[in-house]
Image (spheres, rainbow, N blue to C red):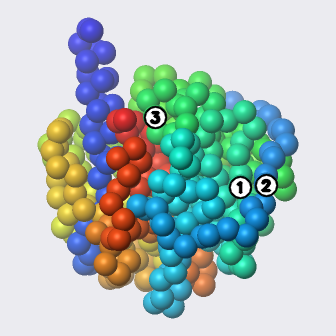
Amino acid sequence: MDSAARSHARRRRLLAIAGAVVLAALTTPAVAAMPLLQATAPRPAQPSTTAIPTSTSPSADTRPRTPFPAFVLDKGRFTAFDAPGAVMQTGAAAINDLGKIAGNYIDADAAYHGFLRDRRGRFTTIDVPGALATQPSDMNDRDQIVGTYSTTARQPQAPDAKPRGFLLDRGRFIGIDVPGALQTRANGINNRGQVVGEYVDAAGNFHGFLWDKGRFTTIDVPGVAATSPLNVNDLGQIVGGYVKDLTEQPLTIRGFQLDKGRVTTFDAPPGPFTFATGNNNRGQIVGFSATGGVTDGGPIPTIRGFLLRKGVKGPITPIAFPGAPNTLPNGINDLGQIVGAYQNPDIPPNPQGTSMQPPSAMSAALAPR
């Protein structure tokens, strides 16, 4: 292996370690503003369209029974559930203003499937045609769902997954694939149909993107090694996380919000790992942070969730499922309802399972198996 290959392998390993981490203690973050560099992709994508089959589950047990169930937090009250067919985990990724929840679950074969849960608790399974893994990551009030799929692996973060993005709109599948990218993930969608996500270019570098009417715009926080946009609201405010220096020990990941061309960065102390996973049209943000540093081969910090109720400059409110060692919030709607996943304190983790994974290439696509 030559020096360039070794350097690339080390970068991938460090990103994988960052992906295993999630969350921290929660207090008021330090905030700084910086400009955002954007460059339009060389050409607009020409997404292909095909029908997506879905199946509605019959009456089934949806009580929390896996090592990592999903939760809904509404007016201070947690409600936990697992999707029918879930054996290893259920991840609630998003909730719209109609109370519908989109997410994913892992079955007995360690394969990812998508789901849609209506207000009555009924589930519809979502599987991209021909895919071995389907991982929805967000949904808007028009019931449009975006996410990631793989036709080569049962888990979209597996090394051989070659993940691609998708949009599910009225039963039809539209591919979202950055031209020339090795990987593409669609992470968030607003009610205008704008999609944000991330991609890995031919050189192995991570970039964010905005997809609007089939045209890509690259999003790179200036001076950083990897940018990961995770959600966008109707105001065009984009939230996510970034890594400034992949050689830093311990590795540091900071949360950010992009608003009208300016990036505001923030940390959830004590850090140094902060990700903003969701935002609503009221400017409220949910996310997670890590209690300790990330080193090559070092321990994995504990996962803790947070809510920025008054936006990026406001105080942080902790989100912790009662009794759970780890809590990962993923999405928030305009009613303030929050969804995510937690580590079940009553069930030991399945040795064949996987840990909670946020819908991010930077934190999941390179996770080791």
Helix, strand or loop at mark 2:
strand
Residue at image mark 1 = 125
> Residue at 76% across / 65% down in the picture?
58
> Residue at 72% across / 33% down in the picture?
130
> Residue at 59% across / 76% down in the picture?
333
Q: How many marks?
A: 3
Residue at image mark 2 = 55
213 in relation to 179, above or below: below
Q: On the rendered structure, is 42 left or right of 267?
A: right
Give the x, y percent position of residue 151: 63, 30
Q: On the rendered structure, is 130 left or right of 276?
A: right
Is 18 in front, or is 115?
Answer: 115
Sooner in the amino-acid sequence: mark 1 or mark 2: 2
Are dots 1 and 3 in contact, CB under 8 Å?
no
Sooner in the amino-acid sequence: mark 1 or mark 3: 1
Residue at image mark 3 = 158
280 in relation to 115, above or below: below
Amino acid type shown at disc 3: Ala
Q: Is residue 57 among what the camera can see?
A: yes
Q: Distance between the residues labelled 1 and 3?
A: 22 Å
> Residue at 35% across / 56% down in the picture?
349
Q: Is residue 236 among what the camera can see?
A: no
Are dots 1 and 2 in contact, CB under 8 Å?
yes
